[in-house]
């Protein structure tokens, strides 16, 4: 499912116009993005949690040349699946 399909499913599920469903979806995504960008984690019980993992600088290797390079520190978002979602996926529909 992509974003457009999610918007369409939301519009049908809660019986609102496509434009309103798009606004809701965009607001949720923007709010979650802002929270993660500010270093906050997001927990949706039963669904899962989004967290930021921080990685320190390290010495890597350029795969093309084999030359050593310094990789800068970085932060990456991760998703941890919640129990209810994991169980539902394993059961199927």
Image: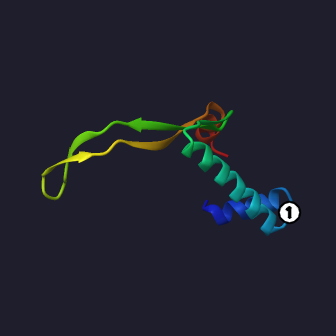
Helix, strand or loop at label 1? It is loop
Q: Quadrant of residue 47?
A: top right
Give the residue at x 67% y 46%: 93
Residue in front for this viewpoint, 22 or 89: 22
- Quadrant where the N terminus sits is bottom right
74 over 9 or under it: above or below? above
Q: Quadrant of residue 48?
A: top right
Residue in front for this viewpoint, 28 or 69: 69
Residue in front for this viewpoint, 48 or 20: 20
The residue tagged 1 is 16
Would you say 56 lies left or right of 53 here?
left
Residue in front for this viewpoint, 8 or 90: 8
Q: Position of residue 5 (x, y in %)?
A: 67, 64
Give the residue at x 60% y 62%: 2
Would you say 9 lies left or right of 37 here?
right
Residue furthest left as drawn: 66
């Amino acid at each position: 499912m992509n974003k457009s399909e999610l918007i369409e499913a939301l519009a049908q599920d809660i019986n609102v116009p496509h434009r309103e469903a798009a606004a809701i979806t965009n607001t949720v995504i923007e709010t979650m993005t802002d929270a993660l960008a500010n270093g906050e984690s997001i927990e949706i019980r039963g669904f899962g949690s989004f967290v930021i993992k921080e990685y320190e600088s390290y010495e890597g290797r350029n795969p093309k040349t084999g030359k050593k390079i310094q990789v800068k520190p970085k932060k990456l978002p991760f998703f941890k699946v919640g129990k209810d979602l994991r169980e539902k996926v394993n059961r199927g529909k």
